Amino acid sequence: QVHLVESGGGTVQSGGSLRLSCLASGRSYMATYMAWFRQAPGKEREGVAYISNNGVATYADSVKGRFTISRDNGKNTAYLEMNSLKPDDTAIYYCAAKSYSSVPYNYWGQGTQVTVSS
């Protein structure tokens, strides 16, 4: 099993920045693919950014150019650098992981709240 713990959420003004961290423990080697999802009140969960073990990253159109996903495999940690934050970015942000590209994300953190005030 992979245990994921997010940190770094908080409240920030519109235009501000935050960096989220996701520490993987347990069988962390199984976290080949890692991602950040978010869920706003009354909305479905959506994928925000994805990164493979070798650092290939992809982004949702809504955050492209503002968010950067990265990972430090030596520290078993993934990051989400969020810049130019907007009130629409307000959500609970979840870290997720999986071992294979062809399966759904099956390891999830507990989430961290990000609130962007206008």
Image (spheres, rainbow, N blue to C red):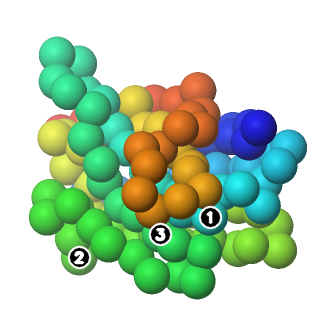
Judge left or right: residue 107 versus residue 5. Answer: left
Residue at the image point whose x is 17% and y is 16% from the top? 42
Question: Where in the figure is residue 75, as x and y percent of width and height?
Answer: 81, 67
The foreground one among 39 and 14 is: 39
Q: N-terminal of the two: label 2 or label 1?
A: 1
Image quarter where the C terminus lies is top left
Closer to viewer: mark 2 or mark 3: 3
Separation (CA) of disc 2 from disc 1: 24 Å
Q: Secondary structure at mark 3?
A: strand
Residue 3, percent across and down? 74, 37
| Residues at circles 2 and 3 in contact by the CB criterion of under 8 Å | no
Q: Nearer the viewer, mark 2 or mark 1?
A: 1
Relative to the observer, which residue lies in front, 9 or 62? 62
Q: Is residue 46 above or below residue 18?
A: above
Q: Which residue is mark 1?
A: 32
Could you say which quadrant of the image residue 82 lies in? bottom left
The residue indicated by pointer 3 is: 51
The residue to which callout 2 is attached is 65
How far is disc 1 from disc 3 in space, using C-alphas? 9 Å
Mark nearer the N terminus (1 vs 3): 1
